């Protein structure tokens, strides 16, 4: 006659074996589902600098499983990618998304490009990226005081889009390339030449 303790031990081993089998089946099902969700997407084969046209040699194809909310470009859209230009400095190995590309190099028709030298203390702590929208605001208080006048109640401001942010120099000054409506180009250039301005980061999608 088999002892009760041995019977319980054998029953426990059988239960554990069944549980492991179930877990293995679930894992296999999950892996199979993920593999079936893989798709061929475009990835950068080498670095592409800002404003450079994308060539077929710059792009390769990889198979990955990505969540639906992730912005990727499928291999079937290679013809649309080749000939576009880099919206920023693109790094090899990164998945290509629509936000990384432009139809033409900036400035576009009706725009002008204005470089702005910006000290680190004037930049947002979170940094800027290509596509960030800013207001460049005149800060004439010190100039007005020096000239014996009063600063205007509402300062001038120009709405711009960042197309490139250069690396800071030894003094911590970064060069921003921004695009602005052509009619505002001269006024913005004159303002940044005074070095008396502030940057206001605008929310994505805002009109101002």
Image (cartoon, helix red, strand yellow):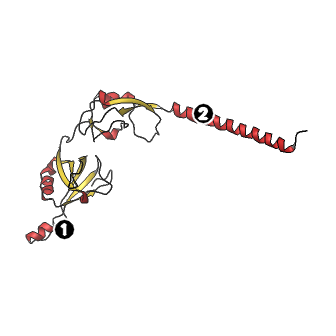
The x, y position of residue 165, in whole percent, is 25, 48
- The kind of secondary structure element at disc 1 is loop
Identify whether 168 is placed above or below 34. Answer: below
Residue pictured at 32% horizontal, 38% vertical: 91
Quadrant housing the C terminus: bottom left
Considering depth in this image, is 37 or 64 the residue closer to the camera?
A: 64
Instruction: Give coordinates of residue 35: x percent, y percent.
Output: 52, 31
Instruction: Say which of marks 1 and 2 sits in front.
Output: 2
Q: Is residue 35 left or right of residue 11?
A: left
- Residue at horizontal 33 percent and vertical 55 percent from the top: 126
Determine the image quadrant of residue 27. top right
Quadrant in which the N terminus appears = top right
- Judge by depth and name the residue closer to the eye, 121 or 158: 121
Q: Is residue 149 above or below residue 118?
A: below
CA neighbours of label 2 inside 10 A, class few (<14), some (14 to 19), many (20+)? few
Q: Earlier in the sequence, mark 1 or mark 2?
A: 2
Q: CA distance from mark 1 to mark 2?
A: 68 Å
Q: Is residue 186 above or below residue 81?
A: below
Q: Residue lying furthest right in this view? A: 1
In this image, 111 relative to 11: left or right? left
Q: Where is residue 32 shown, x and y percent of the image?
A: 56, 32
Label 1: which residue? Answer: 153
Q: Residue at x 77, y 42 (%)?
A: 12
Q: Pointers 1 and 2 in contact (CB under 8 A)?
A: no
* Quadrant of res 20: top right
30 left or right, relative to 81: right
Q: Of residues 93 and 54, which is closer to you in this image?
A: 93
Q: Is residue 116 above or below residue 153?
A: above
The numbered mark at residue 28 is 2
């Amino acid at each position: 006659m088999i002892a009760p303790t041995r019977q319980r031990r054998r029953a426990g081993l059988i239960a554990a074996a069944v549980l492991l089998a179930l877990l293995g089946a679930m894992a296999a099902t999950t892996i199979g589902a993920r593999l079936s969700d893989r798709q061929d997407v475009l990835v950068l084969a080498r670095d592409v600098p800002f404003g450079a046209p994308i060539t077929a040699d710059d792009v390769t194809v990889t198979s990955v499983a990505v969540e639906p909310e992730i912005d990727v470009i499928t291999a079937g859209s290679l013809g649309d990618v080749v000939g576009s230009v880099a919206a920023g400095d693109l790094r090899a190995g990164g998945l290509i998304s629509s936000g990384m590309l432009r139809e033409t190099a900036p400035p576009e028709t009706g725009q002008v490009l204005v470089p702005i030298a910006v000290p680190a203390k004037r930049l947002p702590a979170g940094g800027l990226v290509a596509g960030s929208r800013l207001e460049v605001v005149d800060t004439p208080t010190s100039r007005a005081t020096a000239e014996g006048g009063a600063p205007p109640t509402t300062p001038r401001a120009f709405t711009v889009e960042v197309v490139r942010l250069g690396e800071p120099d030894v003094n911590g000054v970064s060069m921003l390339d921004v695009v602005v409506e052509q009619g505002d180009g001269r006024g913005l250039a004159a303002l940044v030449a005074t070095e008396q301005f502030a940057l206001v980061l605008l929310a994505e999608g805002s009109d101002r």
